[in-house]
Image (spheres, coloured by chain):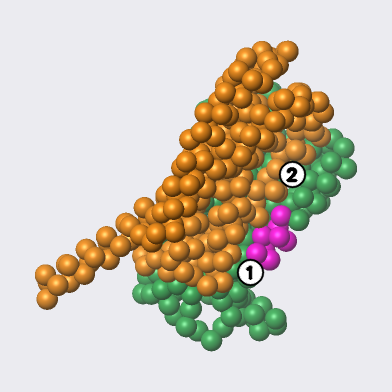
Amino acid sequence: MKQPSAFVDRMLYILLVPAMFVSLYLIFIWSPIEKQMGASQKIFYFHVSTAWVAFLAFFVVGYYCVLTLKKPTESRFIKAGISAEIGVVFTTITLLTGMIWGKSAWNTWWTWEPRLVTVLILLFIYIAYLFVRKMEGTWEKIAKLSAVFGIIGCINVPIVFMAIRWWNTKLHPVVFGEGKNQSGGGVEPDMLVTLLFCIGTITLLYLFMMRKGIEIEKMRLTVRKAKSKVIEKLAS
Amino acid sequence: MKIILADALTIAAKDLRNELKSKQTIGMMIIFSSLVILIFSFAFDPTNNTVKAIIPGLIWVITIFSGLLGLNRSFISEQENDSLTGLRVAPIDPSSIFLGKVVANLVLVIIVQLISIPILFLLFDYRFHGEMIWFLLIVLTATIGFIVIGTFLAALAANAKNSEMLLPVLLLPLLSPLMIGAVQATKIVLEQEGMKDAVSWLQLMAAYDLLFFAACFFLFEYLMEGS
């Protein structure tokens, strides 16, 4: 691989590892304990940051899908795929941390609230997108098909959110108001700093994973090409 | 635009004539929807009064499940004798293929609904009190949305070997906002609650229909390009 790319990777790594430890320190030691929920609120920092990255990854997928439709290139296709894979991981983490938090804060694992359901459907769309990419055929064809699906999926997410918000506010009492504890009104400044730092760290993690994933995928492609070349040579 | 419509109608007529002769897909869809009702009557006791509350949901479960069967066939059947390539190289706009397939599928699903919804009301001993016009309007709006996005994804999934399995996985998450609207609006009409809410759900569904129709209409040619 080229030199500058390796340098960027190393820099990201050097930044990421301390940032992770610092954010752990900020979460567990530095930031104050929330009054009502106690220590269980700490999961909130990772929950919000992974949710943010899940949506970010989704928009990256949408962005590269549009680009792929404009002009299909291998690297755009790979980028969209890697972003979707990372998106699945982060969406799952968001759901799991949210459930743990919900159990301790609301005393229920799951509630049909707009944000929860949107994230769940987002996960399903991600997985469906990955299924489309696993189809047989030339990569140009799959790139086109998956890009089309990615765009349709992107259009869908805001509508899902609106529909579920309507569903819940019009026909059921609103059980959990806007931003249960923090995100709406009063965020402690210390908590906000921790939260922002966490979001930064997780975004960095996303970037790092993205770069690594792209590199691995490209290596895989190179190996596959070399393999088919060898097979051709042996056959002829 | 006129040419696209005329071509679309030709394709739809071809599909429907084909269906009229074989009656394979539509027969299967109707039988399947009746079977779903049967299974549901085992799952939820129809003599129980509270079961009336799930009727709006059942209407849509039946529509989606039986509709999926028809959607699966609509492009797979074109692969025999490579007719899809024939359509693709024909001197027509790709969008007219989409439009034609949408019309054909819509007709099929509406026929199935015309038979299965009365059967559902009959077997569950449900007395219809709501306003017929609104009920039909809601059913039609939601069905159009379902068929538009379903036809599009069926064309996409037809490229895969396991398209029968792939289509529901692709379709159901995208369908979720439409289904929320459809079930809620149907419930409001059947239980004769405030019509204002039903109208706003109807607006949401109409917006969904238009948005996805436009998106699918323009993206469809990318699906047809690939070999």
* Residue A113 appears left or right of B112: right
Q: Residue at x 57, y 23 (%)?
A: A25
How far apart marks 1 and 2 lie (CA) works out to 24 Å
Tag nearer the camera, 1 or 2: 2
Chain with colour orange in the figure: A
User: Which residues lie in the magenta part?
Assistant: B208-215
Q: Residue at x 63, y 69 (%)?
A: B217
- Coordinates of residue B125 in the picture (x, y in percent): 67, 32
Q: Residue at x 47, y 83 (%)?
A: B89
Q: Which is more toward the observer, A26 or B45?
A: A26
Residue A43 magenta-highlighted: no
Disc 1 packing (10 Å; few <14; some 14–19; many ≥20): some
Q: Are marks 1 and 2 in contact (CB under 8 Å)?
A: no
* Residue A116 appears left or right of B138: left
Q: Is residue A219 visible?
A: yes
Secondary structure of the residue carrying tag 2 is: helix
Q: Chain of mark 1?
A: B
Q: Residue at x 59, y 59 (%)?
A: A63
Residue B176, placed above or below residue A5:
above
Q: Which is more toward the observer, B94 or B24?
A: B94
Question: At label 2, which amino acid type do we have?
Answer: Met
Disc 2 packing (10 Å; few <14; some 14–19; many ≥20): some
Residue A103, placed above or below residue A71:
above
- Coordinates of residue B48 in the picture (x, y in percent): 64, 22
Residue that numbered label 2 is attached to: A162
Residue B213 magenta-highlighted: yes
Residue that numbered label 1 is attached to: B217
Res A41 quadrant in image: top right
Q: Chain of mark 2?
A: A
Chain with colour green in the figure: B
